[in-house]
Structure formats: C-alpha cells, structure tokens
Amino acid sequence: MLETLAVFVLGIAPPLFSLWVMRKVQVRARENLIRAREIPVVRIPSRTPFADDRRYVEGIGEVTGDPTCQFNARSAYIRCAVNPSGPCQNCPHYRSRNSESKRKF
C-alpha cells in the first residue's frame, strides 16, 4: 500500500509542478503588460528632413535635390552619395548627368 502511494505521488508531482510554474509565468506576464501600459508613449512628428527640396520627376517619383546631378540618389530621403545632407546649390561635386549618360529626366 505504501509503495502504491509513493508511485502515485511521484506520478502526479511533475504535472502539478508544471502547472504551478505556468501559473507563476502567467502572473508575471500579466504584471509586465500592466506596467507596459503605464509607460507614456512619446510621438515624434514624422516630417521628412528635405520636404522643401523635393521635386516630382515623371517616371521616377519624388526626388530630393537636383535630379540633373550625376550623384543624385533619386530618392525622397537622400540627396546624393557625396553630399547627402545638402544643399545642392553651389555644390562643388556637381556633375551633369546628361554629360555622363544619355538618360533623360
């Protein structure tokens, strides 16, 4: 009879231990979610840095900077590889794209 009780206790102990651990993890996760809700959310205004220097080029879309320059990235976010933050006016690295390639914009 004592052996049967020992086998029963040893057989039921792992699932009970597992349930106890799962319950503690659920309580901890719930507390973490409650704490996360209390953190204030800071919204950063989404304004692209070169909004005033954008141009729309047919077939490409919005381009920042001078689209006739060879180094222009043809992107709305980066002006060029040489001078990404600009400005394009009086840039010493300007090279006409038309002289280097036959593409038209």
Image (cartoon, rainbow, N blue to C red):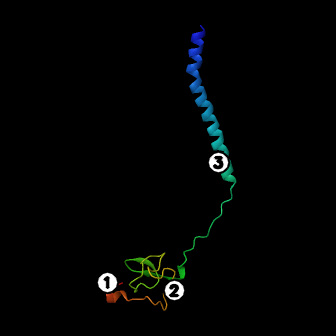
Quick one: label 1, few (<14), some, or many (20+) residues within 10 Å?
Answer: few
Compare marks 2 and 1 and give the one earlier in the sequence: 2
Q: Nearer the viewer, mark 3 or mark 2?
A: 2
Instruction: Return the mark for residue 87.
Output: 2
Q: Which amino acid does label 3 sit on?
A: Leu
Compare marks 3 and 1 and give the one earlier in the sequence: 3
Q: Which amino acid does label 2 sit on?
A: Pro
Instruction: Return the mark for residue 33.
Output: 3
Looking at the rendered structure, the secondary structure element under dot 1 is loop
Which quadrant: the C terminus? Answer: bottom left
Compare marks 3 and 2 and give the one earlier in the sequence: 3
Residue in front for this viewpoint, 29 or 103: 29
Q: How far apart are marks 2 and 1 (CA)?
A: 24 Å
Q: Give percent across and percent down for residue 54.
A: 49, 81
Question: In the image, what residue occupies the spot 63% across and 31% down?
Answer: 20
* Up-down relation of residue 88 to residue 62 (above or below): below
Residue in front for this viewpoint, 40 or 93: 93
* Up-down relation of residue 49 to residue 90 (above or below): above
Quick one: label 2, few (<14), some, or many (20+) residues within 10 Å?
Answer: few
Question: In the image, what residue occupies the spot 60% across and 18% down?
Answer: 9
Looking at the rendered structure, the secondary structure element under dot 3 is helix
Looking at the rendered structure, the secondary structure element under dot 2 is loop
| Labels 3 & 1 near each other (Cβ < 8 A) | no
Q: Give percent across and percent down for residue 29.
A: 63, 43
Q: Nearer the viewer, mark 2 or mark 1?
A: 2
Label 1 belongs to which residue? 103
Q: What residue type is labelled 1?
A: Arg
Q: Quadrant of residue 82?
A: bottom left
Left or right: 54, with 38 as reference point: left
